[in-house]
Image: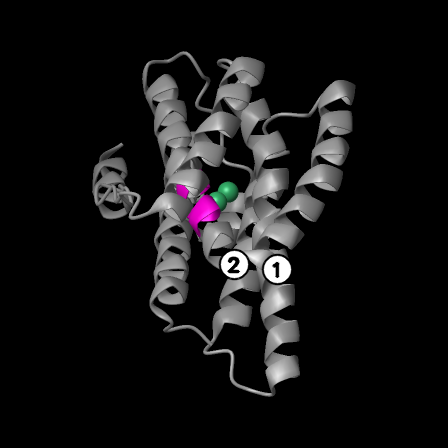
Amino acid sequence: MKNEISFDAELAPESFQHHVPQDLKDRIALRIVKFMRVFADKFFAGRYGHRAVVLETVAAVPGMVGGLLQHLKALRHIRDDQGWIRELIEEADNERMHLMTFIKIAQPSRFERFLIAATQLVFYNLYFFLYLLAPRVAHRVVGYLEEEAVVSYTQYLEQIDAGNVENVAAPQIAKDYWKLPDNARLREVVIVIRADEAGHRDKNHEFANKIATGAHP
Ligand SMILES: [Fe+2]
Ligand SMILES: [Fe+2]
């Protein structure tokens, strides 16, 4: 299809911006993410649909936690949030739409559902306290997680292009949300989602930078 090419070029996250760790806090954030990636790679291997479903349930947590804590902080200090609250909650909502899309493509097994619940219990609480005590590290962790998400969705795309993953029709929910053409396939969906992840990556690194330089609310 011809429109696929321009579509690709528009949304390719070629500005692959890896944030080079600047100090110990950044290196800790990167280590945490690389450590988590090892488990995800081992557990899911080549099952990209399942990987997306499970990991998107995790990805939708930090924005809501960050939004909540920034909201409480703005109330406490009675001052403007510089748009951070809305930005973070929108990130969480966008991640939830990724989940709602992939659930149409792969259904989690009973064990994966258990894993989702157990991970949420642990991750929500860990991230809450991380954000409370070290918001800069928390945003940096998400920045690095999103770097990995871009890598994973690029691999997913390569598998679709290689014919190893069936390029099924795009779910209706995805066509509505991203305003995709009626004949859109999984390939287009993965491209727009990858572009979302690149956006979250840049935003979270920017938030971490702002906290580091004191330019935050
Ligand atoms: Fe996502
Ligand atoms: Fe994401």
Q: Is residue 177 left or right of residue 58?
A: left
Which residue extends farthest front? 24
Q: CA distance from mark 2 to mark 1?
A: 6 Å
| Along the viewing direction, whichever of 47 and 125 lies nearer the viewer | 125
Q: Is residue 211 left or right of residue 16?
A: right
| Along the viewing direction, whichever of 205 and 31 lies nearer the viewer | 31
| 26 in relation to 70, above or below | above
Question: Where is residue 132 shown, x and y percent of the image?
Answer: 61, 60
Residue 94: mark: none
Which residue extends farthest bottom? 78
| Residue at x 33% of width, y 67% of height | 213
Residue 197 position by quadrant: top left
- Magenta stretch contains residue 141: yes
| 208 in relation to 72, above or below | above
- Magenta stretch contains residue 64: no
Q: Is residue 23 left or right of residue 70?
A: left
Residues at circles 2 and 1 in contact by the CB criterion of under 8 Å: yes
Q: Which residue is mark 1?
A: 132
Question: Where is residue 43 shown, x and y percent of the image?
Answer: 58, 16
| Along the viewing direction, whichever of 183 and 126 lies nearer the viewer | 126
Q: Is residue 184 visible?
A: no
Under circle 1, the secondary element is: helix
Dot 1 amino acid type? Leu
Estimate how packed mark 1 is, as few (under 14), some (14 to 19) or many (20 or more) residues with alpha carbons within 10 Å.
Answer: some
Dominant secondary structure, magenta: helix
Residue 135: mark: 2
Q: Which portion, as a residue range, is magenta?
A: 140-145
Under circle 2, the secondary element is: helix
Q: Is mark 1 within 8 Å of ligand 2?
A: no
Q: Quadrant of the N terminus?
A: top left
